[in-house]
Structure formats: C-alpha cells, structure tokens
Image (tube, rainbow, N blue to C red):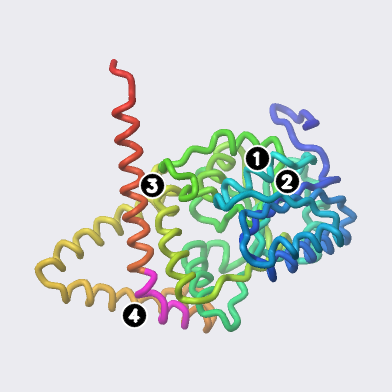
Amino acid sequence: MVQVARGHRTVPPPLDTLSVVIPVYNEEVWIRACVTALTAAAAEARLPLDVVVVDDGSTDRTPEVLRELAGAHGIRVVSQPNAGRLAARSRGLAEIREDWVLLLDSRVIIDRPALSWVRATIAEHRDRAVWCGHVDVETEGNLYAAFWSGLVKIGWRRYTSEPRLVSFGAEDFDAYPKGTGAMLVPRDVLAKAVQGFDSLFDDENLASDDTRLLRYVADRTRIWLSPDFRFRYNGKQGTRKFLKQSYFRGTTFVDGYLGRPGPVRRALLAAIGLGGGVAAASLRRPSIAAVGLAAVTAIAPAVVARAGGSRDEVRGAAALTPVFVVTFGAGVLRGLVLAAARLGRRRRNAPAG
C-alpha cells in the first residue's frame, strides 16, 4: 500500500478504489438488496468497486442469486463449507485487490450518498482513515430487531441521543456504537488487526470478531463515526433465531470485554456477581429468581424510553427482556467456561521456569 508521510504518521492514499468483503449464509433476499444498494452508492460516488462475496456454505437459493449478481454487477463469488463469519471474512480478505476495504454484512444496506460523503471527507482529512458506519436498525414490524435497537440506545446513548461526527480511541472505546458489519478501513491497517487478533477462546466461531478486532485498531488510531456514513440493518425475526443470537452474543460479549478494563467490563463483573448471588439464594428460595427477573423486566422498558427509545423499542424491551436475560446469561456462562478452559490449557502448556 502506498502511503504518504505526514509528521510522524503515515496516512493512506485517497479513496479512489474500494474492495468490499461480504460474508453470506442463507440470505437470498438480503444479499441481493445489499449488493444492489452498494453498487448504486459506488456509482453515485464514481468509485470503482472490487466486491468479494464469500458464500459460507449456504443451503438455500443464495448461490443462485450470487450467480445472477455476478453477471449483473461483476462481483466475485468465493464458496466454502460453512465455517462462520470470521473464517468467511478471512477468506474474502485473502482475495481483495485494492488499498481500501469495506467490511459489510449481507443484511446491512448502505445509503446511496454514503460513499460520496466519506470519499470527499477522506480527501479533505486524510488522517480520518478508519470509519464505522452509522447503522439504523429497521424496527417496523420486527419486535426482535426493536429489542436489539433499544439495547443500542441504552448502551451508547452518548452518541444515539445526538448522532454527529465523532471519533473514539482506546480511552473512550466503550462509549460509542461500533461494529465490523459496516466498517471502512485501509487494507494494511485491517491486515495488521487480523494478524494481531487473539481470542479468549480456542473456537474461533465463538470469538468476538467485532469488539476485539476494533479494540486492536482503536489502540493505534482513532475510529470515526458520522450519521452521514449511514447504513440500515435488517434484523432477523423469529423466537428461535432470537434465542440463538442472544446466546451467541452472551458468549462473544465475554470475549470482547472480559480481558480489557473499562466500564463495560466492570458492569459485566458486577452482573456476574449479582447473578451468582441470586442463583445461590434461589437454591434455598426459588421465588427469589422469579422476583429478580420480574424486576428487571419491569425496569427495562423504562430505561429504554429514558434513553430515547421508540414505542417499538420500548415494546420490544417489555416483551423480550425476560427471555433475553436468561439466554444471554447462559451465553455469558458459556463464555466464562471457555475462557477459563483456555487459560488453564495455556498454564499447563507454559514452559517451567
């Protein structure tokens, strides 16, 4: 990658071409919408694209749709047996050609002006090199998506209460929304982050490829966020998918936050202590667990409303909090067991000294 020296830093070249990596698994509807919106945004920005879609072992019509999109838009399609998003992304990154990379999930739809805006901004401010997308969650008719959107309003209200151009680094990492489902980054920065990625778990399918990877980047450079670099996320529906997602996020939450100091880790440790205390007390009086769950369920909608949540988000909190608390908590417990198991193996295998 060609870089330009500026003081003691190097900055990336202008955003004149862009590689995009999209992992996909059984998303025959959304992958079409994702690629179509992406190519329209690139055309408006007059930005040549190199799009690599990695089909992670889809079993629906996704492969057929990808063949159609390859013909219509010139995307490149790579297929592999199902191995998870982290493996699919890694495969895609091995195929890209350009100096800039956009990581994009198949249910994330880019707004048409987004690439034009970020290209002009980078041209004017060359040191603003890493961007997380401003992602709005489509909540209409989807109670499950509304629930997740409400959690975002609570956790990152410093930004969601007043969306604006901001940047964050390691010191305020926990205060802002972020994710690799819509992330623009120089290729060499991303390559170093992937190389430096290290999970608390042995199973990479359960690793936090969002938070831990972004922490590596934030330790070294500011990450930028703006409502002008906007995307829309279309969440999954159905109780079974919600339970699976909650359990998985509980596990990855441990991987993303347990090993690093900050308010989220303190909250996690406090929740673990409180949950352990309630569980122990419930062995003697089972009603304690029911009362505790009822209290959290009653409080959650009020907290979402206070954080600026919409009516749908408040309804989602009221309906799904009890299910989420139990399932997410089980995922956290799994994460703690996996982290402890790996730590134990490392200590046993460490050379004597």
235 lies left or right of 297: right
Q: Nearer the viewer, mark 3 or mark 2?
A: 2
Verify CB contact (< 8 Å) between mark 4 and mark 3: no
Q: Residue 148: in sight, yes or no?
A: yes
Q: Which residue is mark 2?
A: 101
* Label 2 residue SS: strand
N-terminal of the pair, mark 2 or mark 4, is 2
User: Rounded to the nearest whole Å, what is the CA distance between mark 4 and mark 1?
Assistant: 42 Å
Q: Nearer the viewer, mark 4 or mark 1?
A: 1
Q: Give, as a three-letter code, the residue at label 2.
A: Val
> Residue 290, percent across and down?
23, 76
**Do tag 1 and tag 2 residues touch (Cβ < 8 Å)?**
yes
Residue under pointer 1: 190
Q: Amino acid at mark 3?
A: Leu
Image check: 174 left or right of 88?
A: left
* Disc 1 residue type (three-letter): Leu
Q: CA distance from mark 2 to mark 4?
A: 43 Å
The residue lying toward the viewer, choosing from 83 and 23, is 83
Q: Which residues are magenta?
A: 315-324
Image location (x, y in percent) of residue 153: 51, 68
Please name whichever residue, 34 or 180, is drawn nearer the observer in this view of the structure: 34
Q: Secondary structure at mark 4?
A: helix
Q: Earlier in the sequence, mark 4 or mark 3?
A: 3
Percent across and percent down for residue 242 are 47, 70
* Residue identifier under label 4: 298
Which residue position is annotated with label 3?
A: 258
Q: Is residue 128 magenta?
A: no
